[in-house]
Image (tube, helix red, strand yellow):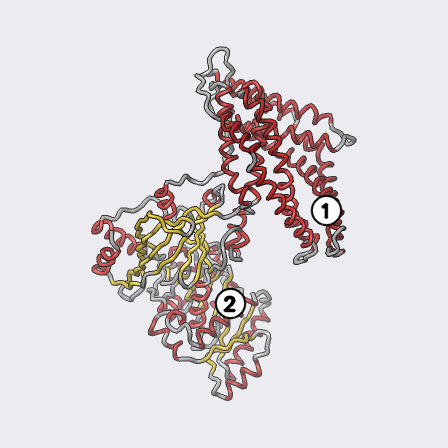
Amino acid sequence: MPTKAVLASLTDRHLTSIEPPVTSTRTYFDTHDGRLSAAGMSLESDRHAVGATVTVRARDNEQVLARSAMTGELRAAADLPSGPQWDRLRMVLERRRLLPIVELRTTTRAVRILDATSKTTVRVLIEHHVFMNEGVRTAGVFRHVALAPVRGYGPALADVAGHLHDAMGLMPVDGPLLHVALALTGQPGPDTGARPGAGADPNVAADEAVAVLLGRLFAEFVDAEPGVRQQLDVEFLHDFRVAARRARSVLKQVRDAAPAAALEALPTQLAWLGRVTGHARDLDVYLEMLDEPDAVSIAGFGSDDLDPLRAFLRGRRDAEQARLVAALDSVQYRLLVDTWRMAGEPRNTPAAAGEVLTVGELADRCIARAHRRIVKPGAAINTASPAESLHDLRKRGKELRYVLEAFGDLYPAKPRGSLLRELRLLQGNLGEFQDCQVQALALHKMADELLARLDVPAATFMTMGLLAAHLEQRQAQARTEFAARFAAFAAPRNLRLVKDMLGARRAVGTGV
Amino acid sequence: MNVFATYSIKGGVGKTAAAVNLAYLSAAAGARTLVWDLDPQGAATFLFRVKPKVKGGGKALVRGRSEVETLIRGTDFDNLDLLPADLSYRHMDLFLDKSKRPTRRLAKVLAPLADAYDHVFLDCPPSLSLVSENVFGAASTLLVPVIPSTLPVRTLDQLLKFVNRQGLDDLRVCAFFSMVDRRRKLHREIVDDLGGRPEVMKTEIPAASVVEQMGTHRAPLATYAGRSAVAKAYRSLWDEVLGEA
């Protein structure tokens, strides 16, 4: 429907004020894992001749939650305007990079519908959109007439909407402009972070279910790779490594049900990947540590004492990034990708019957074994046990978590959820213990390396020392709390929880 | 939610002009802004072209029998809404007097809006009454326009004494010289003498016919005379008020 026709129809019927056309480039953003969408928000920047604005809206009704003038690029939470209305958005984004999901070149003709006193009662925005791809026009265009309500003038809005429908045949679209644009481009919805699982049918052949699981983990893995290469944000590398770690853990635990070719090569390949990406991840963690409230408080708000350490770590991270990308360009990596892709391909095994192991049986076995491998060694840990025994227990805890998440859909939600919650609490304690130890040791090592440099002031070393001492204190605290935390995890009621969970699945599986 | 009240015991000193122009600037900067026109004359309501009518009147509003959200009207400007005046506000003192906690009723009316707006401007009637006491209780900042002559300055001193006596330590008083005519010796002397006081803003709002034209345009200054000296003065005043927040 041409703009002129819509304008003529409105001006014939209403008192109007027509504003000159305005052209802008609108970019919608979200994180790779769709945090804004999951939080019910949308974020857009509008760049036009006289400036730029950034707007966050409620995703379902496009209500403006905050709007501000914008300077510079919008890449992450740090680029958002200051103010309480933006703080909620910052909490959602955390450290994730903002990625453009739709870019439109829009020409808008705004028409204000006026009452007898020339008060605006409705704003009609006649928009002509051209899809852009990295700043270049594409052939994709669409028109959109938006009615922007003015609070308290509902009848006027209904009247205009009715007229546009009756006289011009314009139908209301289902959802806001962003949804329309995403649908037109055929884009999938953003990844909402749900963990890949093996499915909910316990009677599927185990090897088929494992292939599905490996396939989903592979999809997560390759999805994160571009973000790792471009170093978009720290979460891409984390997600990349976690997908690989989960796959390796699954292969270790399901052994009999995994494809033989995958079992032969993939664990070694994944271990290699863990090694070549590990140092980069460590550096990301150390840099994040320096921005945590503890570190900021120890250094003093606004202090630059830790800046030399930050610069040192950033330099190391940049060098490590080059090595990491080289590893991703290597033949070894291509082999890993091919092996994993093949392991994730459907087996097309018929539904299991008789002697073929089902995924339900496999899951029960894996969960029971992984649970035993925590409870027994955990009970043996006492105050004299070395730190490594807690680090090992943490690894066992991860294995249990991975199988619970991989096969979780086979089990009733309540006991599974309760078990995961208890496990998270235990892992939280073990993680605090290990991470603080590793980070404190790392600070000592970094101090040695920085000593060789003449441009690092004494204040930096003193602050590093205070920070290391604080981490060691936290580590000691975590160690003190371990016994109670483990006792809660291994309490009889939680042991019954596992038994009940596995029993409930079997009861459902047999129709009892 | 920050609540700013343009207040003076005297009329015709520039309260409504300040409320409307500063609210516009607040909204233009992206803050969700509401103007509550408490003056039964309804000047702010007129300037925003809204009907001066509140369903149920002021009585139902302060007694909690109306839902304030349903009474708010959008203006012609993004992020800027208006809770209109109503002729019944001329009896506001009576409505408040007959209510429980009569000095806290206006704050109670505003409470449900705390998450919906960043800044609220109360355009107050010229008086020293129960309405004023409610405004002092609801506002975090009093914006007090003062014409630089003897009697208005005396009125400012009376107001400061009153605020002090009432123990309103959390209430920030930002007085500013309004309708300043630097050609007049008295204006120059008073502005120069009193400009250093801590409660007096450095920005002066000059007397200008473009402000009177707000009534003809029925719009904030920035929309039709954005480059005028007085529009710039309001921007400077708003920056100063925010800077001290």
Q: Residues within 10 Å of mark 2 (few under 14, many from 20)?
A: some
Instruction: Residue at 52%, 39% (x, y): give it.
Output: A224
Q: Secondary structure at mark 1?
A: helix
Q: Is residue B243 left or right of residue A11?
A: right
Q: Position of residue B42 (x, y in %)?
A: 37, 69
Decide if residue B132 is in sight here: yes
* Residue furthest right in the image: A384
A490 w.r.t. A57: above or below: above
* Residue furthest top in the image: A354
| Whole-number angstrom distance, CA of label 2 to CA of label 1 | 62 Å
Q: Which residue is mark 1?
A: A446
B200 w.r.t. A448: above or below: below
Query: The residue under label 2 is which amino acid type?
Result: Glu
Q: Position of residue A206 (x, y in %)?
A: 51, 19
Decide if residue B95 is in sight here: no
Query: The residue under label 1 is which amino acid type?
Result: Met
Q: Chain of mark 1?
A: A
A116 w.r.t. B113: above or below: below
Q: Secondary structure at mark 2?
A: helix
Q: Is residue A431 left or right of residue A207?
A: right
Disc 2 and disc 1 in contact, CB within 8 angstroms: no
Q: Nearer the viewer, mark 2 or mark 1?
A: 1
Q: Residues within 10 Å of mark 1 (few under 14, many from 20)?
A: some
Q: Chain of mark 2?
A: B
* Residue furthest bottom in the image: B185
Q: Position of residue A124 (x, y in %)?
A: 31, 56
Q: Toward which corner of the image does residue B77 lie, by quadrant?
A: bottom left
Q: Toward which corner of the image does residue A331 lie, by quadrant?
A: top right
Q: Is residue A355 left or right of residue A46?
A: right
A1 w.r.t. A203: above or below: below
Q: Which residue is mark 2?
A: B133
For the residue pair B227 and A507, the one nearer the viewer reads as: B227
